Every structure is written in structure tokens, then in C-alpha cells.
Image (cartoon, coloured by chain):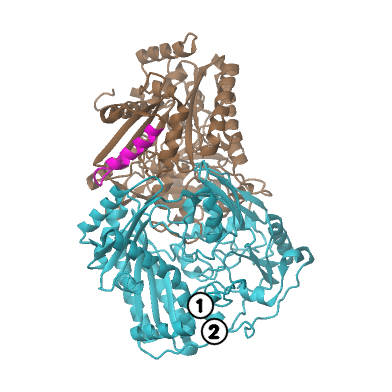
Chain colours: A cyan, B brown
Amino acid sequence: MHGEGAPRRRSFWGWGWEDRSPDALALEKLARRVSGALGGELRAAPAPSLEAARVPPSKLEVPAALAAFCTADREARIRHTYGRSWRDVYRGFCGDFSPAPDLVAMPRGEEDVAQVLAWAEGARVAVVPYGGGTSVVSGVEPAVGDGYRGSLSLDLSRLDRVLEVDTVSRAARIGAGATGPGLEAQLVPYGLTLRHYPQSFEFSTLGGWIATRAGGHFATLYTHIDDLVESVRMVTPRGIWDSRRLPASGAGPSPDRLALGSEGTLGVITEAWVRLQARPTWRGQASVRFGSFEAAVAALRDIAQAGLYPANCRVLDPQEAFLHRVADDGSAVLLLAFESADGPRDAWLGRALAIAAGHGGVSAGGAGGGGDQESWRVAFFEGPYLLNGLVQLGVVADTFETACTWDRFGALHEGVTARMLEALQAVCGGGALSCRITHAYPDGLAPYYTFIGLGRGAHALSQWEQLKQTASDALLDFGGTITHHHAVGRLHRPWYDRQRPEPFARALSGAKRALDPEWILNPGVLVDPPTGDTGPGVDE
Amino acid sequence: MHGEGAPRRRSFWGWGWEDRSPDALALEKLARRVSGALGGELRAAPAPSLEAARVPPSKLEVPAALAAFCTADREARIRHTYGRSWRDVYRGFCGDFSPAPDLVAMPRGEEDVAQVLAWAEGARVAVVPYGGGTSVVSGVEPAVGDGYRGSLSLDLSRLDRVLEVDTVSRAARIGAGATGPGLEAQLVPYGLTLRHYPQSFEFSTLGGWIATRAGGHFATLYTHIDDLVESVRMVTPRGIWDSRRLPASGAGPSPDRLALGSEGTLGVITEAWVRLQARPTWRGQASVRFGSFEAAVAALRDIAQAGLYPANCRVLDPQEAFLHRVADDGSAVLLLAFESADGPRDAWLGRALAIAAGHGGVSAGGAGGGGDQESWRVAFFEGPYLLNGLVQLGVVADTFETACTWDRFGALHEGVTARMLEALQAVCGGGALSCRITHAYPDGLAPYYTFIGLGRGAHALSQWEQLKQTASDALLDFGGTITHHHAVGRLHRPWYDRQRPEPFARALSGAKRALDPEWILNPGVLVDPPTGDTGPGVDE
């Protein structure tokens, strides 16, 4: 725990708070656990030091117009270089901060944002919007290519206020830089909550969630932040994009749905109206064990198609159930929870349990269910901290996730599993793969995989790249999406390009050029300039 | 009723089947009813004849390449001139078919569609996609301006097949030209149903629903076709737009959400995968009477925010309740229904009724509830036929609808009512306005208004225009959308332009130009060419 009074610091290279990164004792324990599973002898290398980090000198001077909120400070640049994928943490651990931005700006409000864009257009500087810095797809990494005079990381963290609350419609206008805990704390006095809990909840921001179509707490129905957004406000190089607050509309394609997932390429999200819930006063939960993963998934499908809409409805395969301390008997586990601010929902939970029982599921009942859910929750939010330790131990480990229709899941799961185990064997001499289902829809599901293998010293990065390639190819080949809720960024571009309709890429590129003719906003992410353009700075 | 063997014909000028348009007796009855309410003496003018219809000669010859499925036939052109708003039916009744397309094409498949677009680009002919021809916003009217050599109405009705059914994921691939009854009939053997019932259900098509973001059966949750679309296939002038079938995705902005609401401006929708439901086996319904509209709306809000998701949840104000034969005692009525293919949902209905009772609602109970729902359903689908009779009687009548957040509804309803009653007084010497709430969301609702006033002979069209302007201005001024589920078309353009974020208009225009550089697809709808362009045919 961090000392009283001392400002708590985030790790400059790894996940989360410095004081919660695994210490020597935890590293030893982790090493034994991984060795037990994968063999090999693991020794933790010491965590890197900020002083030893290698960062190129800034190519840009702080412009006078932005001096009040912009810096070329070395530490700020290091801290805005990466997101938090395995690859990011690995490179940070190695002290390599070569893609660092040349400048970091922390706007105090919308006018500062507009000023940054105006300056950057003229100066041919790429602007990379930065929320909580938790991207796992290099969405915030200023790897913008040679077409720019430099790059600026635009950190929105000062725009962190809940600005307005409408308790009648249950909605709030919130600054894009508000983190999960930050906005929830400000909503407490109103008895309202957003209940959007991505694994990055502690650090990631509302603006980041919207820009990346983040997935959250609810396993059914309101799975993505998309479903909770009432209107979006963005600063674009061609003016303010401010959609009307509406519960629904049929007037043309939805502006919000174009902003959602735009990953900083169309504008900088500064605030949004989001739909809130009353704080739940009733919760019913259960943990149901199945003899096989297939049986648990079949139960999940029937529940998802029954119109019951549980808040939680996740399936853990036997490995995940073991890893997350939910079951150690080889069972697959369905974690089921209903919640309500409108009184009991026993009938709902009862019906879901009956469906699960029809597939051979054995319920651990109320208390047991709650315990499993709690074990799951603790492990869920602790998970990312393990990443730091694994990197220190030289272990290659990562997660990848997708969504597919129910009819394709059998082949997808089999194909992904076979190819990944083969690749782990070839690349790491063995390894492990586990799967959980994080979200369920009437017509499909979202599987989430974790893999782990032993690194070979300096080859770890290329091992990781081979495994990532294998996983991504498999997702596409078997009818999945390259991501259900982790965005595209720079990392997923090759597969995103394969997946999307080609005319849609043209349309998106045309839309971006209409708003960002100098192509300064997060270049390299999502789309390239329209064919015929020779790059940034081209006028019509 | 139509005679056996005789092919049933749609009215060339009015709503629906010729044989169901009000006959002399029905017209007399309608005249008495309207006179009773509004005063005046009403005499029905005879229905117009096809022979007397005035249509300008076609400006185009049928091109050889399209000869197999394209025509310049007078009747075909007349039948593809208008949608079915009051203004459309009025102009048809007057025999004015001046905006008729020069050609009508009925493609037999996707290749024919691509051929039309290729020809039209070269020939500078505007292409107006046509589904069921039920637009109430001039979305299918070829009023394309002078920048084109002519216009072609692209009637997709031959693409009417259910092409593939996935019973595991409960989804089907369906041709864009399939009508409501057409696709439902083809789904019966699978025990599945789309359950998307717009008022135009009998004639409107899947492609039209997607292009216009149609609203349907479900009053909560899956309110728009948007929510039922799994993937969309469109022919664009720059290739096939075919999104991957997915239950959900986080990979960039959703391609489907850009196609949804594109109103034929980005491409021609040829087919889509849509999410289906098992046919309900249980239905619970109730009709709840309230002393005031306000009390009924308050109950509606609490139900919408309780996470119960009724299939039907509509509020009728006392006038609507009377008109639809649901109540004649001055009550406002909440029609409530739950349905399920997964066994009883009594607890759901019970909780919704308890909430309604908390607001002073008195339930008519099971059987009564069913009867009211049935009265409502019959009146709902019969409604549009009345339009033909009202036009023949010289009555100005129309509907308009919107959505707003709960906090704004009081002011919006009051403002709309005051302004419309004032306008009806000024324009028609009096009249009536009624309101129902068609859809409910946790954060807002969709009110739907009907107005009626006496026409003044040849001034009827300008009377209607003044009333439409008053209504639309009021919706925008009080925080609503210009449409919750009737699209923008050409009619709503001025208000749509006010409502949307200006940078979004730029983006949409840029997206369109990337796909449709010659600007041939439904010009005049949604967007204009980017600033700097001088019109169609401009090359970069």
C-alpha cells in the first residue's frame, strides 16, 4: 500500500499503480505457479528504472500558443508512449520508449483542444488523443510515420467532471477524461450509476470508452458503452460535433454511432451524455457447474435467447475456473447474476437456473454463487497486475477476444484452440490456452482467450508477434471479428482491413478527410487517406 | 373484397389495396364522423382515374443494357412517383404526377442493380431506390433537381426471398425487397419470426426498413430495425458493401449503423441478415386506464426504467383511446403486453401492473386487456386506409412523431399542443390533435401526434404545409428529433439540417462522395455535395 500523503504514482512501464505491481515475494510465487504449469526455471528480472529509459529527444519545441498546458518534458513523454498490451509492457520493461510523442498537452477545456488542433494542422503535427492510456491495441502510441513533423499526445485527463445530471431521464453529461472511479464517485450523491466496468475501469476514461467502443459490466443487452451513450461532443478540425440528446432517433445514420469506435480519427471527444441506472438494491446470483464447456455454452445460448437479460452471464472453461479460483474440479462454470433497483427478480433468476439445469448444470446456490462471483471479481481486476510480473519473468502471455454467431462457435473454438496450441508448441515449446465467454447475445457470443508460454530471452517479442498473428488469423478465418471490445488501433489494422467492407473503408476515409483534411488525427489508426492522396498535407 | 382469380391491385394514388379503400358507404360514414367532430359539411369527391392522371413524357429511352428489366411505361412511372404521406395521396388524388421517374427498373438480382448504377453514372441519371413505396417523407419521390438528365426508380420488389436461415443463431438472410407478410410467411416453417411490424407492414420492405431505420412492433428494447440487423449487403457505385455477420463488434465504427438510415444515398441495399425470434407461445396483456395522460406517462416512465422490457407499452391519450375504440370515458390508456417463447412471464406483467397501479392506473385485467389490444391492432392497420377517404373529403390530416428525453416531454407536449391548436385555428378554422406514446426508453419516449382540420378546397396543400411546418418547428424547438422512425427523405430535410451536428453533415457528405462520386444515388435526400463541389458530375 502507498504511504499516507505520498502522491500515488502509476507505473511508467507496467499496468496500474506502482505500489500494486507484484513485489519480490509475489514474483517468486508467480514464478512457482507458472513453472508448475509450463516447466522451465523462471527468474524475475528487476523492474526498469525511469532514469535508464531510452527516449529520443523531442523533435518539437513547445509552441507559445500552447505553453500553458503543453510540455516536452521527458517523463511526460515516456508516460504517454504506450498503452498496456503485453507488447507495450514488454517494451517499457526493456526501457525502449522510441515511439514517444514529441509533446504532451493536457488541455484545461474544449478551447485548448481546438487550439491544439488548429496549431497541429498548420504545423503538420500528428495528434494522438489519450484517455487513460490503457489501450491494448497501440491506439495511443504515436507511431505516426514519417509524414509529420512530429507528434503530440493529447491527454484529456483534466476534463474529468460530471457536468450535469438529469435525474428524471437518468442521464449525465460527463467530461471525456473522467475515469471509472472518478465518475462513479461524482454520481453517488444522485443515487445513480453508469455501471460500465471494463477490466481497465480504474484508469480508463469515458472518452476512451466511446472512442474504442469499450465493453463493460453487463454480459447481455447493454454490453458496450455504445448502448449507454445518449449524445457525444467532439472537437474536430472543422468545428464542434455535438449531437442532440435523444433516447432514440430515426433521422439519418446515427452521428453517435459514427463517433463510437472512431478511435480519435474523426475528432477529440470532450464530453458525452450517458444513460445511467439507479443503484441496484437487489441482486441474485448463482454459480452453475457443468461437466463440459460445451454444455455450459449450450445453456448460455438458451438463456441468451430466452429474453431474460441477466446482468452477468459468463462461462468459464475449466482452466479459467481454476485460474480465477472459482472451481478446481475440472468443471466449466456459468456465473449468473441479476440485479435490479426495482425490487426482487427471483422469477428471472429462477427461470435462468431452470434452463441451466436442463443442460445438466448444478447450481452452487445463493451464498456459493456470491462467493464465486466475488472470487471472479477480485481476480478480474487483479489480472492486469500479473502482466507486469509475467513480463519480468520473461513469460509471453496475452489475451485476445472476439464475437461470432452461435452457429460458428464450435468450429471457431476448435480452430482457435488447435492453431494456438500448435503455435505455442512451435514458438514456446508448449504453453496453455484458456477461454471464457464474456458476453452473450440472442444470435451469438463473445469468447475471450488467454494464452501463456515461456519466453526465450530476447526473442520474446517475436514469439509474441507470431502468437498474435496466429490468433488473429484464426479469428478471421473462422468467422469472428478481430475484436469484440478492444478496438482496432494500430495493432489490429491488418485484420480489420480484411474484415470490413471495402466500400465502408472508402466511406470512412472520405468522412475523415471531410473533417480532418490534413489527416492529423491519430494517423495510422482505422483508415488511410483516400486513394489518390499522397499523404498528409494534400489540399483538394 | 377482391374477386377470385383477379390480380389484386394497389391503389395508384392512395394507401394500400384498391379494394380496401373506403367505398361510398364508408365515405359517408367517415364524413359524418368528421363533421361531428369538426363541423362543416363534407362531400366526397370521386376517386381519380389512372387514365386522367397527368404525367410528363419520359426524358429517357430505355437503355439497351437494361432492357430486360427496365421500362418507361406510363403506368409504371405513375406508380413509382410518390410515397404515401397525406401530401402524396393528395397530389395523386389531384392527378398530378409531375415528379414521375423517367424510367422504372425492377432488377432480378444484384448484378442488375450494379448494371443500373454503372449505366446511371455514365448517363448522369439519378437513381431512387424504391421498396414498398410507403415513405411518408418523399424518400422515393424522384424530385432530384435539374442537375441530372433524368431519374430512374429502382424497384427492389423482385428480391423478395428468404435466402438462408440459421436456426441455431436465430437469424436469416433475406432479400431487401421482401415485404412484411412475404418474409414472415417464408419464416413460418422454421418456427421463427422477425416480429417487425411498422404500420406499413403489409407493403413496406426489409430494405426500406433498413434504409429508413423503421420502427416496429416492440415498444421497448428492440424498437427499430437497427436492433435486428446482423449484417447488410449493399451495391454501391464503388463495389459491394457486405458486412460480416456478427452479434456485436468493437472494430471501428459499425458499418451497419452507417447503412442504417442512409436512405439510398450510399448504396442500394440488396439483402441483410436479420435477428429472429422464436414465435411467442405465451402472451400476457393488460389495458390500464388513468384519469390523466400525465399519470399514464409517469407510469410509462417508471416501467421503462424498471428493466422489464414489455413488448407493448403504449400510452393513448383520451382522444386516441376514443378514436381507436379502446376507451370512451375520457381515460388515458396504457396498453401493456409481454410475450415469450420461453414460458410464462406473469411476474414481469405483475410488476409492470403494480407500477401502473402506483400511479393510479386501473387495470381492465386479462380478457379486457386482450380486447383493447385487439381493437388497437385493427385500428392501427386500418388507419392508413382512412387517409384515402379523408383526402376525398377534402380534409387535411396527418401524423408526426418524435422522441425526446423524459425531462423535456412536459414542455414539448405542451408546446406542440398549443402551437398546433393555434395553427389549426388559423389555418383550418379549428381542428383536433391527439397523441399517443409509441415507444419508451429508460431515458425518454417517442410521442406520436395526429392532427385533423377542414380543408379549403384548392388551398388544402398549402394548409397542410403550414401545419407541417408548425409541427416540425415545434419538435425541434422543444428538444425533440424531426423523426423517431419515419426517416428524413426530402420532406424533413430543413429540420434534419438544423438537428444534426454540422461536422457530421460534412462527414456524411464526404462518405457519400467516396462511394458515389457522381452523386447519382437519391440526390436531395440527407446531404448535399461537399462545399466546393458544383454539383453532380464533378471529378476530383
Which quadrant: the C terminus of chain A? bottom right
- Is disc 1 in contact with disc 2, using a CB cutoff of under 8 Å? yes
Residue B271 within the segment the image draws in magenta: no
Kindly report the distance in space between the C-alpha atoms of the residues bearing marks 1 and 2. Answer: 10 Å
- In which chain is the residue bearing label 1? A
Give the x, y percent position of residue B472.
57, 31
Q: Residues within 10 Å of mark 1 (few under 14, many from 20)?
A: many
Q: Quadrant of residue B284?
A: top left
Residue B73 seen anywhere in this rendered image of the structure: no
Badge 2 is on which residue? A47
Decide if residue A434 is on the left or right side of residue A115: left
Farthest right residue? A64
Q: Amino acid at mark 1?
A: Ser
From what the image shows, is residue A13 above or below residue B254? below
Farthest top residue? B41
Magenta range is B338-358
